[in-house]
Image (spheres, rainbow, N blue to C red):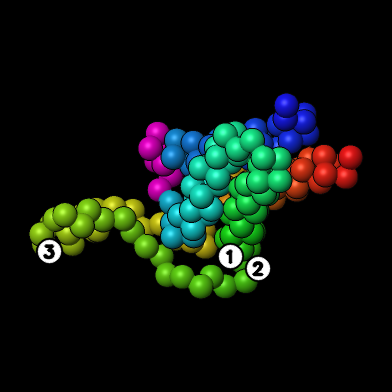
Amino acid sequence: MTPPAIAKARLIALLVPLALLGGAWGSQLFGGLYPCEMCHWQRWPHYAAVPIALAAFFVKQPFMRATLICLAAASVAVSGAIGVFHAGVEYGWWPGITGCTATADLGLSDADLLNSINDRPLIRCDEPQWTLLGVSLAGFNAIISLGSAILIFALVGRRRAA
């Protein structure tokens, strides 16, 4: 039987990246908020966390299960750290390290590709597209991801200390 603290940690390690990815994709597809390059960077660790956390549901050995949960939490924390950096760029605390990018369909001819690029919005990494109470999406990702990772590590650590 899986201890309750580990079961909670495992569930959080799976649901948080799924929810944040769902929110990111939902805001992109339905809200018209196209991601900048750093927004994409924040998604990759969540993509990694999902299968790692999912694997923790199928592992019977307690040490391996806890290791997978901690790896998923570390991936979530990496996304949060990228979110802190991105939010800092948006708030002007430090300069960004990337140029602004626009998405394009690479299956087009050169002329159509240029038109495709020109027809798409240029998304700047240093200007938030949306905020709530002064917190951007990158800021919310940082808060939720880092807070969740801390909670997951605490739950796994609580079980290991017991």
Would residue 115 be seen by someone viewing this image from the given angle?
Answer: no
Q: Is residue 50 left or right of residue 119?
A: right
Q: Which label belongs to residue 159?
A: none
Return the x and y of residue 161 as percentages of the image width and height. 88, 45
Does residue 150 show up magenta in the picture? no
Q: Main secondary structure of the magenta part?
A: loop
Q: Nearer the viewer, residue 134 or 88?
A: 88
Question: Residue reaching furthest front?
Answer: 61
Judged from this view, the residue extending furthest toward the right is: 162
Instruction: Identify the element where label 3 is drawn.
Output: helix
Residue 15 picture quarter: top right
Q: Which residue is identified by label 1?
A: 89
| Residue 63 point in image, percent of width and height | 71, 46
Mark 3 to mark 2 CA distance (whole Å): 38 Å
Q: Which residue does the numbered mark 3 point to in the structure image?
A: 110
Q: Amino acid at mark 3?
A: Asp
Measured along the vertical axis of the image, is residue 157 above or below residue 3?
below
Q: Residue at x 49, y 36 (%)?
A: 22
Which residue is located at x 22 percent, y 53 percent? 105
Region in magenta: 28-34
Residue at x-position 71% and y-position 40%: 62
In the rendered structure, which amino acid carries the disc numbered 2?
Answer: Trp
**Which residue lies under the disc numbered 2?**
93
Q: Residue 92: image x %, image y %?
A: 61, 66
Dots 2 and 1: beta carbons under 8 Å? yes
Q: Which tag, 3 or 1, sits closer to the chain's start?
A: 1
Residue 132, quarter of picture = top right
